[in-house]
Amino acid sequence: MNRLSPAHACLGQATHSVDGMPAVLRVGATPPTWLADLSPLRRWLVRGGEAAAWLAARDLPIPEQLFRAHDLGADAFLVRTGRAEFFLHDGPGGALRAKLGEIPDGLVAGMRIVVRDDLEVALGGAGADRLMREFCALDLAEVENQFLFTRVAGTTAWLRVEGEGGRRCYRIGCDPSYGEYLFETLLEGVHECAGDITGYADFYDSRGIAHDAS
Amino acid sequence: MPSRLPPQPRERIDRSRSVSFRFEGRDYAGYVGDTVSSALLANGVDVLGRSFKYHRPRGVFSAANHDANALMQAGGELNLRADVTELQSGLDLAAVNTVGGLRRDRGRMVEWLAPMLPVGFYYKTFHKPRALFPMWERLIRNMAGLGRLDTADATQRQPKEHAFCDVLVVGAGPSGLAAALAAAEAGARVTLVDEQPTPGGSLESEFGGDEQAGAIRAGLLERMLAHPGIAFRPGAVAAGYYADHWVPLVTAQGLVKLRARAVIVASGAFEQPAVFRGNDLPGVMLASAAQRLVHQYAVKPCERTVVFAANPSAYRAALDLVRAGVAVAAVADLGDPATRGAPVDAVKALGIEVLAHTAVYEARARDGRLAGVELRRLDAADEPLPEGARRIECDGLLMSVGWAPAAALLYQAGTRMVYAEIPGQLVPAELPAGVFAAGRVNGVFELQDRLADGRAAAAEALAHLGIAVPQASRPGRGSEAHSHAYPIFDHPKGRNFVDLDEDLQLKDLKRAAAEGFDNIELLKRYSTVGMGPSQGKHSNMNAVRVLARLNGRSIDDTGTTTARPFYHPVPVKALAGRRLRPERRTPMHAWHAAHGAEFMAAGHWLRPKFYGPAPQDAAVAAEVRAVREGVGLIDVSTLGKIEAFGRDAGELLDRAYTLRLSNIKQDRTRYALMVDEAGVIVDDGIAARLGEEHFYLTTTTTAAEGVYRTLQRLAAEWRLQVDLVARTGQNAAMNIAGPLTAEVLAPLTDVDLSAEAFPFLGARRGHVAGVPALLMRVGFVGELGYEIHVPAAQASHVWTALMEAGREHGIRPFGVEAQRQLRLEKGHIIVGQDTDGTSTPFDADMGWAVKFDKPFFLGKRSLQVLADKARYRLVGFALPPGYAGPLPKECHLVIDGGEIAGRVTSIGASPSLGRVIGLAMIERRLGEVASLDIRVDGGAMMQAPVVPTPFYDPDNLRQKAPSVAKEAAA
């Protein structure tokens, strides 16, 4: 267990391990507004002229459209973020890693694979929309399944808006150096909405997605 | 509540819910829905505050959010506007501008001094004799101000919110409601805002007694509230207009940043006062204020009133007052009542005397309140005639002599406004794209016309959005003026106020113009007209009229003052919002905090300055000694980190940096200096070659993003085949340094650390504590040292492992201050501290880092010109051991012959050398000097001997040959 979430200092009793990273797994009843730390998940940026070919050789789709999240199942997804740049996001079961094998951080055949140790959170529940209206200057009312680069609470972040039982869930990721600040700030807002942290396993259990949390 | 009326059809109050409150130490009761003003008036309290300058008693004036003389304080809440602040149980209120309370305000003595306080007196007095200025300043500061701020009160912040819509409609009066409905019914996403807590606008009060208007109101409100495409925000002031239809809404809950695709301004008009002696007395108010009190709060504003008229609204007000049981003694009309339409006949039918071409010349006071008026007939030039003057006893005087468009948003959007004789106000002549005006702000007054105008504005807005709807034609602006051209009457005894906020009388504006401030902007600044809390809503138009007449010019030629956002006062807590100050923390931040780090900001980053609990000097000295004699570890995760890869990566670096970097050997590093086009140093760092087409760069902490952007831009401009990846946050870094470094690091890594396998300036990839790492052996602090770069998520693990492994060797973490001291001992510059915004490499004695033999690099041409023109050079100085005189500080000046000849850039007490050392940037004209004359605090001079650098280990043996340092440490 040698990985740490950028939000580790904010998590309190993160006694369980998810893929080598201490995590809060379950908190009991889901708070009315909640924030889940999903930083244990794996992410990569694949960049360079051979990136598309590399993905295609691994039976991954090559999205034509920029910034549309292409669902790979079990919460894994792929987004084209540039002409020769793709964002890969694994799900909690590590399905993508299983498919691709060990993905190195470095130069691979004319492209650069960058492991992204981002802070990743899911913000949801009754107060999530209001909080996002405060923290993000984009009109998110009609955004769905898009992958956006924007600013959240003044920090550069990626954002994926997902529908969730009539309410929305916001998946937010940012550079790890801003992670603790962003988590603290979002949690302050969540607390104002009578909410709190929810667990990694709680989050995926509620969606019926299998995970490897122990 | 002696002045409370029986239930009124439009009343906002809930008579089933009583509210208790205090005002100026006395207990009162009101109802839920009351404002503070309406509740006090219902209780017979008609003096609500004191004026800003003369402390004259003031009462309800507009009852429309602009009563700047009825500002109150409730605990830590300052400047509550009594005319709109909703009554809450337990409120304990006091008027803000009194000395010793509202009733016995000692500040009213200022009025006796009025002859000595003419307009602009503060520009002309108090500066002589100079010694007395502090006394005057204290006195004025004590007298001025609105409310007492207790700095011990907790900081208040309100979260902000972003909102979006297709069409923003400002104002929920008849025009706004019609516009919102028309836009929404065509499918647009509409936001409708109104500063009042309920929709309806003038339908709620000024047309409150009109049955036909009542039916229209009911229909509009029912449709608007039921329409799913309209988001109605009551109690929201659209307080400014910014580019691209960005409108901040000020609400009780905080600021809403609303972005619209089109904006319809249906904000109505502010009723304007007449200017005559005594026009500020409690009991004198705008007719619309009286109507609000009657219809919305069921409060009888007075017992017997005179109506001062110049338009049909005045007559509707008279009728409303009669229905409320107020005796209307007379209507004094500045013009011909026959032109005012049907309401005049209704007034006359009630037996009320209507006086044509008659002005209120003076309002008379008894016990500080209105007791009666003097009416005078006007001559052909509209001047009051003394003959036949007539006095009428009354405790109320309602003014309805004109309107000014609430056009601040239109102005801010860039609208050109022109004065129109019909309807007697400024109207939009040219609107910017996507901005539309409707209703009274557009000069349209008749109710049916206002509805049509709203619908037409909506059609235009929809067309702007590309939504096809039939275009509706705009109604005309009628055939009569609704504002008198000059409702302003001079009086030899003055007290005829143009600006009640600032206590400005007619004579003040005349004097200001006579003194040469005869431009409207100058007049405003000199006299402060329009600069009070109501921001000129009731004074600017009359000031323009006064100045136009004094200059003999038209209103258009006179112009108006600039309406800047925010046009309405906004609580600071709303502007502040939540504290969002993005902060970057390294993965080891929690470790640092747990080990006593004192943090300092470096750009967005927080870095350990030193590790306590020892005081800074002692802690830094111990940290420096640990590095020089044993081993130390510093978190350098904040350094910028960039990867460049691709066929032209080396070419890019050669062109972007001053040194040649394309020929760095595999797994080697080199110093990298960047200048801008002017040849000024902007950054330095290390470049490491990790592959034939793969480089890893570090930058200074604060320049990371700038360097990355510059490299991206240059790569694009030069069409180079190179990809750049910013790794600053994704990679953490730490530097382990000191003679015992290898003892700590070797057991944790699979990299061979021997000097032969890993020479000075080498770079190796391997593992540290089981984590993939890049190690670079650099002379960071002049000792054997390795900069270790690892993935951020695993950095804490690596750091902890190093600290654990180093425990038996006395390892210490060290912070930025020790790092600075260590670097200073080596004479290493810190970009931005030892250089400034003009320093070239030649100024910093770094000509060796400039390779002119390269075909091109950024800044080359500038540096070629500057190479033999460097003005400065960097020199070292050292004070004698045991020096006890005044110490120079960074930025203290080097003086030569009485002239500034340089400055100290770095200074510190060197634990390694036992003396104070420093760097100074001095002018080259000084030549080779033995010492520097430095001016220290207090102006004293001291001499600092110049010495060569590096101060410590001048042959750099310790970093190159670790055995030397190790022997020394042993």
Image (cartoon, coloured by chain):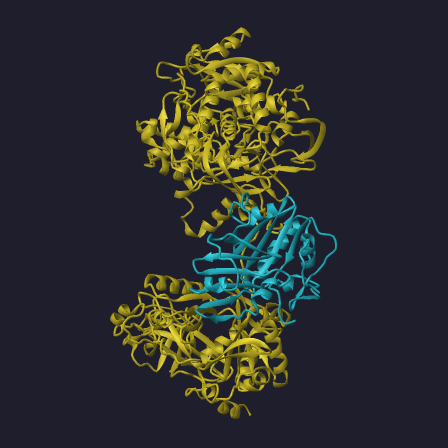
Chain colours: A cyan, B yellow
Question: Quadrant of residue B668 in the image?
Answer: bottom left
Out of B775 and B648, give the one closest to the viewer.
Answer: B648
Question: Quadrant of residue B298 in the image?
Answer: top right
Residue B393 can be seen in this image = no
Figure quadrant of the N terminus of chain B = top right
Out of A126 and B266, give the one closest to the viewer.
Answer: A126
Residue at image position (49%, 37%) is: B166
Out of B955 and B908, give the one closest to the viewer.
Answer: B955
**Could you tell me residue A171's position as x and y percent?**
59, 54
Q: Is residue B408 above or below residue B478?
A: below
**Could you tell me residue B579's position as x and y percent?**
56, 53
**Could you tell me residue B710's position as x and y percent?**
38, 63
Q: Is residue B739 above or below residue B457?
A: below
Residue at image position (60%, 28%) is: B226
Residue at image position (52%, 93%) is: B967
- For the image shown, how many numbered marks are present on the structure? 0
Figure quadrant of the C terminus of chain B = bottom right
Left or right: B612 in relation to B926 = right
Q: Is residue B259 above or below residue B389?
A: below
Out of B8 and B765, give the one closest to the viewer.
Answer: B765
Residue A110 can be seen in this image = yes
